[in-house]
């Protein structure tokens, strides 16, 4: 399970990151290998559907291969530049706003927890958002 910010460029202050990290560990004590990931530039987190598809948010064209190339391009150039132009219909968007099949996305701050058990309840998500100070989303990863 990965909890990351809804805004891919959000960078909550350190004390808030640690508070949210500690809170998640308290909420899911059965989880293990907990880790607080912090990056200067957005990291792409793929969800359970590792081979899941991604679609253009405007015209619905499947753009998996294009996304793979875009991710490589990001690593080689400026990873904070999520702005892109879709290959199918030439419209400007953010890589974070593509129509992903399942939860996937970018974040600079993420809390990783293996085998945490149940998904977070809405009230627990609210607690995490209060601790971190920004909206969050959960991405389930198969390891
Ligand atoms: Zn398109």
Image (cartoon, rainbow, N blue to C red):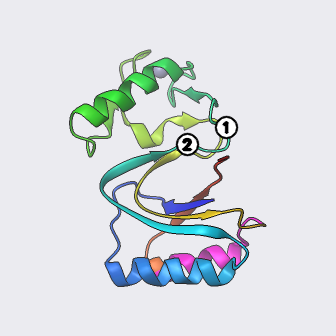
Q: Which residue is mark 2?
A: 46
- Say how many tags the image has: 2
Look at the numbered discs 1 and 2 and tell me whether their residues touch, using CB distance below 8 Å: yes
Image coords of residue 34 (percent x, y): 56, 69
**Mark 1 lies on residue:** 49
Q: How far from the left and from the top, in percent, is residue 72?
A: 35, 28
Query: Is residue 104 positioned above or below 139 on the image?
Result: above
Q: Residue at point 77% right, 66% down? A: 117
- What secondary structure is found at the residue carrying circle 2? loop
Residue found at the very far right of the displayed protein: 118
Q: Is residue 134 magenta?
A: no
Q: Provide the secondary structure element on which disc 1 rests.
A: loop
Tag 2: Cα neighbours inside 10 Å, few (<14), some, or many (≥20)? Answer: many
Q: Main secondary structure of the magenta part?
A: helix
Residue at the image point whose x is 38% and y is 32% from the top? 71
Q: Residue furthest front?
A: 33
Please indicate, yes or no, whether residue 136 appears anywhere in the rendered image: yes
| Residue 82: numbered disc | none
Left or right: 16 as drawn, with respect to 22: left
Q: Is residue 141 above or below residue 5?
A: above
């Amino acid at each position: 399970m990965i909890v990351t910010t809804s805004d891919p460029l959000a960078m909550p202050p350190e004390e808030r990151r640690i508070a949210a990290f500690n809170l998640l560990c308290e909420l899911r004590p059965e989880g293990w290998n907990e880790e607080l990931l912090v990056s200067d530039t957005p990291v792409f987190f793929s969800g359970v559907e590792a081979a899941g598809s991604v679609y253009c948010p405007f015209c619905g064209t499947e753009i998996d291969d294009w996304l793979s190339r875009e991710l490589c391009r990001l690593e080689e150039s400026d990873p904070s530049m999520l702005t892109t132009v879709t290959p199918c219909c030439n419209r400007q968007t953010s890589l974070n706003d593509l129509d992903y099949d399942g939860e996937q996305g970018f974040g600079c701050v993420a809390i990783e927890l293996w085998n945490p058990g149940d998904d977070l309840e809405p009230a627990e998500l609210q607690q995490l958002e209060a601790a971190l100070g920004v909206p969050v989303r959960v991405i389930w990863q198969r390891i």
